[in-house]
Image (cartoon, helix red, strand yellow):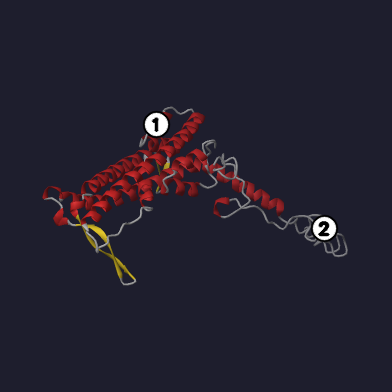
């Protein structure tokens, strides 16, 4: 779930407090811990607000997509966890190592649920251990000969009945990373299949934005009006269009082998060049268009149900 990704993102902007050892230390530690707890609560509130906006936008986007396809149960798009499952239904079959499967949405939902559960438990452990009496100070760094100190948790100060939390927190952090990687893999596979249907011109980029960043609701909302396409058929059509343009833009034939003095030769030695012959005015040099605008081309206007060039024109 994007909530904890947003929570971790917001925490990056928290300032780190320091301790002045020339004055009484314990009141400073108490103030630092209290300030950190308050900052964490603010981060949770900010993350919840942003997540709610993304959840609603993503829900609206998937509701519109489902309505176009006559799919039922679009209310799931507005419910945490179920919205991932519904995205999997919209994505359809997912190619996994050459084998098409239909359960990737369910797998992504399960992994997301475990990841969120572990993250929530980790937050509970963190808040339980944020007690001023459990901390002391340590040297953080030295700048210009002056030492700066920060608060540090001391195991011996934690009551025996709560020390299991320290081990649990370490194990929890390891499991969070493991399930995050697994969830990320499942999300990438699912959303790549999703955007092959709904933004065929750049499915990899859209997958990257949806799976790796906590703003997938905004991305889904941006492509909500796109009609689903068969990606393989779309690619074949683009290749046919590309080949046709290449044929049209290619300089005219070499005039055949009709003799050097005839008009059909290489522009005609002694004759006039026909438009479209090698020496004439036909053709534009075979510049052509790039059939793969996703990978750096600027000319491809691919439809793929994509509407305008930018899927984020609404923003």
What is the crowding at mark 1: few (fewer than 14 residues within 10 Å), some, or many (at least 20)?
some
Residue 22 relative to residue 159: left or right: right
Q: Position of residue 109 (x, y in %)?
A: 34, 39
Mark closer to the chain start, 2 or 1: 1
Instruction: Please provide percent x and percent y for residue 17.
Output: 31, 57
Residue 264 badge: 2
Residue at coordinates 49% horizontally, 38% vertically from top-left? 221
Percent from the top left, x then y, of residue 203?
50, 46
Q: In the rendered structure, find residue 76 and report the number of the disc placed on it.
A: 1
Determine whether the residue tagged by mark 2 lies in a helix, strand or loop.
Answer: loop
In the picture, measured across the screen, residue 273 lies left or right of residue 21, that is right
117 on left or right of 277: left
Q: Would you say residue 292 is visible in this rendering?
A: no
Q: Position of residue 105 (x, y in %)?
A: 38, 39
Q: Which sits in the foreground, 218 or 143?
A: 143
**Quarter residue 73 falls in:** top left
Mark 2 surroundings within 10 Å by alpha-carbon count, few (fewer than 14), some (14 through 19), many (20 or more)? many
């Amino acid at each position: 779930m994007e909530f904890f990704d947003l929570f971790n993102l917001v925490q990056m902007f928290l300032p780190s407090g320091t301790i002045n050892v020339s004055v009484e230390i314990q009141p400073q530690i108490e103030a630092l811990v209290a300030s950190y707890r308050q900052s964490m609560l603010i981060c949770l509130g900010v993350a919840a607000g942003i997540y709610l906006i993304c959840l609603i936008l993503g829900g609206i986007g998937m509701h519109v997509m489902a309505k176009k396809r006559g799919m039922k149960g679009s209310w799931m798009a507005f419910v945490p966890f179920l919205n991932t499952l519904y995205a999997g239904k919209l994505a359809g079959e997912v190619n996994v190592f050459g084998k098409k499967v239909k359960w990737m949405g369910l797998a992504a939902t399960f992994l997301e649920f475990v990841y969120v559960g572990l993250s929530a438990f980790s937050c509970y452990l963190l808040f339980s251990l944020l007690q001023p009496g459990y901390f002391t100070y340590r040297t953080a760094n030295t700048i210009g000969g002056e030492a700066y100190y920060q608060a540090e948790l001391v195991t011996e100060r934690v009551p025996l009945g709560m020390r299991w939390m320290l081990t649990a927190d370490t194990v929890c952090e390891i499991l969070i990373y493991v399930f995050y990687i697994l969830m990320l893999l499942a999300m990438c596979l699912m959303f790549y299949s999703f955007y092959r249907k709904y933004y065929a011109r750049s499915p990899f980029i859209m997958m990257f934005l949806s799976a790796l960043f906590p703003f997938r609701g905004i991305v889904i909302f941006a492509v909500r009006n796109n009609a689903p396409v068969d990606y393989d058929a779309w690619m074949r059509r683009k290749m046919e269009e590309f080949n046709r343009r290449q044929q049209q833009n290619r300089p005219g034939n070499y005039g055949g082998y009709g003799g050097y003095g005839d008009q059909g030769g290489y522009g005609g030695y002694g004759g006039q060049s026909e438009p479209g012959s090698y020496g004439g005015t036909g053709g534009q040099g075979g510049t052509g268009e790039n059939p793969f605008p996703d990978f750096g081309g600027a000319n491809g206007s691919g439809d793929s149900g994509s509407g305008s060039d930018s899927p984020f024109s609404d923003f």
